[in-house]
Amino acid sequence: MENPQILLVEDDVFLSSLLKNRLEKEGLRVSLAKDGDEALNLLKSLQPNLILLDLILPKKSGFEVMEEIKNDPQISSKEVPIIIVSNLGQPEDVNRGQELGAIEYFIKAKTSIDELVGKIKEFLIQAR
């Protein structure tokens, strides 16, 4: 299998560049979307193995992106797993993310980059 492709949806320039560089060092290919619209447009042409999704985004929130993925047959048919990485940590946010299909939910303030990268790699190995 070629190097897994990750779609990183994150509007924080510092965090997105840190995460992108770190994941690429692990041999993963990373496409970056800075807002919800860009993520949905990329998903029409990309077939990522995993989506890392922030919830607080310009244009469309992560929740809106997940709803549109579910409702767009062109994208939903790809069944790409989603891991939420957000500062929203309220139980109702976590529940909503899981109801919309997220397989994992990480709260930025409580998760180190190392821990996140480890979880991503673990998931991609299991998915093979």
Image (spheres, rainbow, N blue to C red):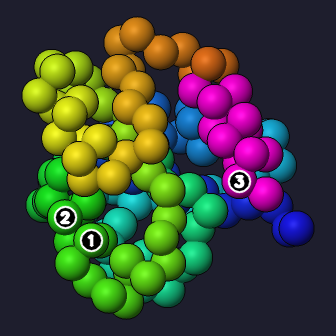
Discs 1, 2 touching: Cβ within 8 Å: yes
**Quarter of the image where the C terminus is located:** bottom right
Magenta stretch: dominant secondary structure: helix
Front one among 34 and 98: 98
For mark 2, what is the residue?
A: 67
Quarter that holds the N terminus: bottom right
Picture mark count: 3
Span of residues in magenta: 116-128
Q: Amino acid at mark 3?
A: Ala
**Residue 46 position in % (x across, y down):** 54, 78
Q: Which residue is disc 3 drawn over?
A: 127
CA separation in Å, label 3 and label 2: 23 Å
Residue 5, horizontal then vertical, whole percent:
66, 62
Q: Is residue 24 above or below residue 43?
A: above
**Is 119 placed left or right of 40 in the picture?**
right
Give whichever of discs 1 and 3 has the lower sequence position: 1
Q: Which mark is residue 100?
A: none
**Residue located beneath label 1 in the image:** 70
Q: CA distance from mark 1 to mark 3?
A: 20 Å
Does residue 22 appear to the left or right of 18 in the view shown? right
**Mark 1–mark 2 distance (CA, rounded to whole Å):** 5 Å
Residue 53 in view, yes or no = no
Q: Quadrant of residue 14?
A: top left
| Quarter assignment of residue 40 | bottom left
Q: Look at the image and say whether residue 121 sits in the magenta stretch.
A: yes
Cβ atoms under marks 1 and 3 closer than 8 Å: no
Q: Amino acid at mark 1?
A: Lys
Asked whether the residues under the numbered discs 3 and 2 touch, taking CB atoms below 8 Å apart as contact, a structural biologist would say no
Could you tell which of marks 3 and 2 lies nearer the N-terminus? 2
